[in-house]
Amino acid sequence: MINYTEKIPNNVDLGRDRVLQRALEHWQPAYLSWWYDMGPNESHNFEVYLRTAISVEPDGWAQFDYVKMPEYRWGIFLQPRDEKRQVNFGTHKGQPAWQDVPGEYRSILRRIIVTQGDTEPASVEQQKMLGLSCPSLYDLRNIFQVNVEEGRHLWAMVYLLHRYFGRDGREEAESLLARRSGDTDNPRILGAFNEPTPDWLAFYMFTFFTDRDGKFQLCALAESGFDPLARTCRFMLTEEAHHMFVGESGVSRIIQRTCEVMKENKVDAPTDVRALGVIDLQTIQRYLNFHYSVTLDLYGSDISSNAANYYTSGLKGRFRETKLEDDHTLQDAVYPISEVVGDKIITKQIPALTALNERLRDDYIEEIQAGVDRWQRVIDDTGISFRLTLPHKGFHREIGNFTGHFISPSGEILTEEQWKAHEFEWLPSPKDYAYVQSLMSGRVAELGKFANWIAPPVKGVNGKPLDFEYVRFN
Ligand code: BYC
């Protein structure tokens, strides 16, 4: 069970390590100050119907109650330790899992933890303004739930930094509160976390696409031979599932509403669809193209010696590593990657160890495709003929083998000029953003009411009805 009587709720017996406890209690006000500055705008006095973990067991989510977000009980929750756990891959395979940081891997491990930690506050910063234009109280509650949990994920990484990395860990923990999404001087570490999330369609796309990168990266880190990292990631994954649900169902409800309006009014052309105050499917496709391609970059280069090192050292595994049936060292294995040669995209086999980023990206793409297929069924069920597609892997990429190439969504290699001529058929234009934002000029806050551009969800939160007061504004 989680101990909520302490200043910092935890299940790691924090009280027994006074030095660590004091260090974290010192970081806590800095975190709160960051939340007041960069957390959801003008929300500090709202009472939000939030879930809080009461234990790390799968059914430990039972606790739902009204909470003012700055009073949310952010804390440190790790899955219980399995005494028999081993390092399951790489050169240390078969050794007992590490309970402390192996000296030789200290700096790369710190780097992985910092990179992971940095994304969490970044996403809260990206979503800061969205509460002002929510389509319903239900959705407002959901974004706030996502935000407080991203805050908790930051706590998870900061605990590891404080507990295992001494002074440099504490310094990194401070830097995590100092960088800012989109800042020119002190930006967040990874590209996608410096992009704006200007509207709710972008938010749902982000939670569908980018939070799912979170899932896959956390799954890879949950395999880590460094046991405390593995255990904390396992618990984070239970929170991540809700974020992806918010994204997938959000986009799905927008698609559903658009299709209903198209059908009722027998319209098809985007301008006619927009005239009815909903988001045309073409614009949804452009947002999808953007978020998908930007998120693919988050997996790093197709050929990566960093990834090979992480694996060989036993620090970061593959997706579902222990379920895979091979030698778990990948000494002789190969893996296919794509490359642009002249005017062709070719596939070539490279050592599987250096292709681990690409492999994780491929695992991700498979799951993404299944989600897009579910969206397609919503369209098909209304009888509208429109196909949503994932663009080619090389489309709009800035990291890896496709960098510097101009690939169309269907996978043709174009000149820069040709690509530019079509850019806004494929990616959202300033006009698209302006249109989508024009639909979201204010907050829809009446009980049970939903903005015109989105269908209500199938059911409410925790068995509550759709007209439940999910947020009290006070
Ligand atoms: N942007 O070998 P390479 C989440 C850098 S999301 C900017 O290609 P590597 C969440 C790289 O640092 C999950 N820079 O990459 C979601 C390296 O720099 P140096 C976050 C990039 O290291 C929603 C250079 O390029 N977690 O949780 O194999 C809401 C070449 O490196 C980018 C993690 O990412 C980029 N996109 O792999 C909230 C897990 N990509 O060495 C939360 C931890 C690469 O030249 N991170 N670079 O200075 C990692 O495992 C790895 O750092 C990466 C990159 C997979 C990100």
Image (tube, rainbow, N blue to C red):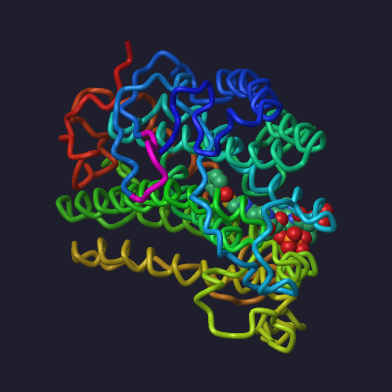
The image quarter in which residue 382 lies: bottom left
Q: Which residues are magenta?
A: 52-58
56 to the left or right of 378: right
Residue 268, image x, y percentages:
27, 57
Asked if residue 239 lies in the magenta stretch, the reply is no
**Residue 53 covered by magenta stretch:** yes
Residue located farthest toward the top when viewing the structure as drawn = 474
* Residue 371 relative to residue 323: left or right: left
Image height of 155 relative to 84, above or below: above
Q: Position of residue 368 (x, y in %)?
A: 45, 65
On the question of residue 403 being in view, the answer is no
Seen at 58% across and 32% down, the residue is 14
Residue at 71 percent across and 27 percent down: it is 19
Q: Which of the image's four quarters has the C terminus?
A: top left
Q: Nearer the viewer, residue 352 or 199?
A: 352
Q: Nearer the viewer, residue 65 or 399?
A: 65
SS assignment for the magenta stretch, majority? loop
Residue 46 picture location, percent across and down: 37, 17
Q: Tag count in the figure?
A: 0
Residue at 18 percent across and 35 percent down: it is 464
In the rendered image, is residue 391 in sight? yes
Query: Is 397 on the left-hand or right-hand side of 149?
Result: right
Can you tell me which quadrant of the image ligand 1 is in? bottom right
166 or 193, nearer to the observer: 166
Instruction: Give coordinates of residue 377: x percent, y percent.
Output: 26, 66
**Quarter occupied by the N terminus:** top left
Seen in the picture, residue 11 relative to 467 is either above or below; the reply is below
- Residue found 47% across the figure and 57% down from its top: 288
